[in-house]
Image (spheres, rainbow, N blue to C red):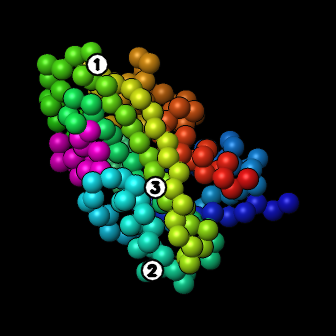
């Protein structure tokens, strides 16, 4: 049986690497092959990442609908820090660009224990076709903001996000995928497809 092609639209090569590994590890078994499309699309600054993901998918349906001949998905992710009332959340990309991990660590100076709790969230917006409304799949992982940046792997906030004592940047892609927000959201999508 041939594999069903699904497009993953993003400009972030690190996300592509993670989703590729997941697609090979578990997607194939479910009859799905993932192809990357590098489209530019405007990312609205909305209060909820669900809304951002839906707005992005709808933008692509409107602007690129005629070109896209297969089901597709985009995803929006964010880091939500407990002591900062969920900041940077939907503004994660902007905040990472402006102040980076060192900036987040400074904001967290003097915060201990429970105050360092944080969650990573991914919302996938999947469209069966350009004329279909997006369907949402979520993935969440709970962890904490490390006391200092550690590890060389991953990207973005990975060096400061600790899961059971290990930062995401200290994990291989395979280890991160098993428990990450993105891994969980992608498995939800695959379950829906099969
Ligand atoms: P696309 O919108 O093109 O997919 P992006 O990099 O703009 O790519 P997001 O808005 O979803 O993606 O990501 C927000 C930021 O959150 C991103 O720039 C990273 O710095 C960070 N981020 C997202 N997922 C992450 C992860 O798994 N590990 C560490 N940081 C992550």
Q: Looking at the image, which residue is at 31% across and 25% down? A: 117
Q: Residue furthest bottom?
A: 66
- Residue underneath mark 1: 114
Q: Position of residue 193 (x, y in %)?
A: 69, 56
Q: Position of residue 54 (x, y in %)?
A: 42, 63
Q: Of tags 2 and 1, which is closer to the observer?
A: 1
**Does the beta carbon of the residue at mark 3 sit less than 8 Å from ligand 1?**
yes
Which structural element holds mark 3?
strand
- Residue underneath mark 2: 62
Which structural element holds mark 2?
helix
Q: Establish if 113 lies above or below 94.
A: above
- Residue underneath mark 3: 75
Which callout, 1 or 3, points at the residue further toward the start of the chain? 3
Which structural element holds mark 1?
helix
Q: Of tags 1 and 3, which is closer to the observer?
A: 1
Query: Over which residues does the magenta segment extend?
Result: 86-99
In the rendered structure, the answer to whether residue 5 lies left or right of residue 104 reads: right
For the residues bearing labels 2 and 3, Cβ distance under 8 angstroms: no
Q: Establish if 72 lies above or below 21.
A: below
Residue 132 location, quadrant:
bottom right
């Amino acid at each position: 049986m041939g594999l069903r092609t699904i497009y993953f639209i993003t400009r972030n090569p690190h996300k592509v690497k993670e989703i590729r590994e997941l697609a090979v590890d578990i997607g194939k078994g479910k009859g799905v092959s993932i192809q990357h499309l590098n489209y530019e699309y405007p990312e609205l600054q909305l209060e909820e990442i669900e809304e951002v993901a839906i707005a992005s998918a709808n933008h692509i349906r409107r602007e690129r609908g005629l070109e896209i001949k297969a089901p597709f998905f985009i995803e929006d992710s964010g880091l939500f820090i407990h002591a900062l009332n969920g900041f940077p959340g939907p503004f994660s990309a902007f905040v990472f660009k402006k102040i980076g991990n060192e900036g987040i660590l400074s904001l967290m100076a003097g915060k201990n224990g429970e105050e360092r709790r944080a969650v990573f969230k991914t919302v996938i917006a999947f469209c069966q076709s350009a004329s279909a409304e997006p369907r949402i799949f979520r993935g969440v992982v709970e962890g904490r903001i490390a006391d200092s940046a550690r590890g060389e792997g991953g990207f973005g906030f990975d060096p400061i996000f600790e899961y059971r004592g290990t930062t995401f940047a200290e994990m291989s892609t395979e280890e991160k995928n098993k428990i990450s927000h993105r891994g969980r959201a992608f498995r939800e999508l695959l379950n829906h497809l099969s």
